[in-house]
Amino acid sequence: MTRIFSGIKPTGHMTLGNYLGAVRQWAEVDQHRGEALFSVVDLHSLTVEHDPARVLRLSRQLATLLLAVGLDPAVCTVFVQSHVGEHTRLSYLLECTASDGEMRRMIQYREKSAQAQAAGDGVRLSLLTYPVLMAADILAYGADEVPVGEDQTQHVELTRDLAVRFNQRYGETFVVPRATKPVVAARVMDLQEPTSKMGKTTAGTGGVVFVLDEPEVVRKKVMRAVTDSGSGGGEYDREKRPGVANLLDLLAACTGGNPEALAGVYESYGALKKDTAEAVVEVLRPVRERHAELSADAGHVEEVLKEGAEKARAMARPTVDAAYRAIGLLPAG
Ligand code: AQP
């Protein structure tokens, strides 16, 4: 059976990009396709300046949201990364497999270390090594597939490289995984800066829609989205008309349409924005409602996470133990 692993970091509130680019597909498709694990990867949120109380709050909120979007603990495994020690156990072995140069080539490292320096914060060593921990998240479970948005494909490539290298040096230990992307909305762009991706931590300019935003807030953000000096209609062109293409992508992702076909339908940007806003509000409505219900029952969410961690631990341990043996470490007995 296909093994599937993916995760989300509690660095901020879940965005429409996270939802359309990854999480929705986890719930609608991936959990039913094989043996699937989904994790709030909280250790990854410690790689940049963080407020401990906020990380805690966001971890609870994201876990609740994963259930609200439709992940069913009877069908898949939902857990918090730090509850399963196998991830960090394996990560060290993979650090001993990776090179300094390949870590410094990671685009997210280059972007986020520049941001940290610009903000006057030091660059944490974990920001450099975090893709190795992500590789451990995936390899510990023998995942065949990793459903992610486009921004994470480089990290999955690194995971593949590390798995192949480890297997060649120390013997067949890891499954070599591959990234899978959604057909639409693999890269949702910021509504105010449509050449940058919509990110949890780039909020502040009103270009990021959050899954838990009130409908009125969603409408305002979409109606203020940057377009261009044209009036409407025409072609779908991500290079020349990134703002309009992003709105068309969003509308298509929310209504099941095709962005190229939708491009010819709208005579004005106002009409495109209005329909996009309503489509986004409708897609998010059931998630917000279910989140409110689940938030009233924190005990249930905790129970799901406890059982999820137990299942995850049992799945990861044999592979991680095998890696320890393969690399030459004396078994604990
Ligand atoms: N804008 C996006 N469009 C499509 N998919 C996206 N994802 C993130 N942003 C977009 C996908 O969501 C999943 C979970 O993301 P993550 O928690 O691993 O964080 P990230 O990829 O580093 O991006 P964020 O959410 O913007 O966080 P920050 O601001 O902390 O970097 C992943 O599958 C990701 O591809």
Image (cartoon, rainbow, N blue to C red):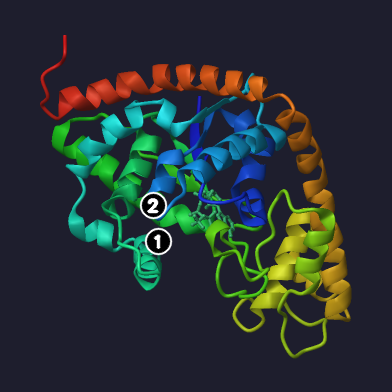
Image quarter for residue 238?
Answer: bottom right
Residue located at (61% from left, 67% from top): 204
Disc 1 target residue: 108
Nearest the camera: 100 or 170?
100
Q: Which mark is residue 155?
A: 2
Position in image of residue 221 (x %, y %): 75, 67
Task: Check disc 1 and give the amino acid type.
Answer: Gln
Position in image of residue 276 (x %, y %): 81, 64
Image quarter where the C terminus lies is top left
Q: Secondary structure at mark 2?
A: helix
Left or right of 52, for residue 257: right
Left or right of 100, for residue 117: right
Left or right of 280, for residue 321: left
For residue 4, say whether it is visible: yes
- Mark 2 and mark 1 in contact (Cβ < 8 Å)? yes
Residue located at (28% from left, 40% from top): 163
325 w.r.t. 134: above or below: above
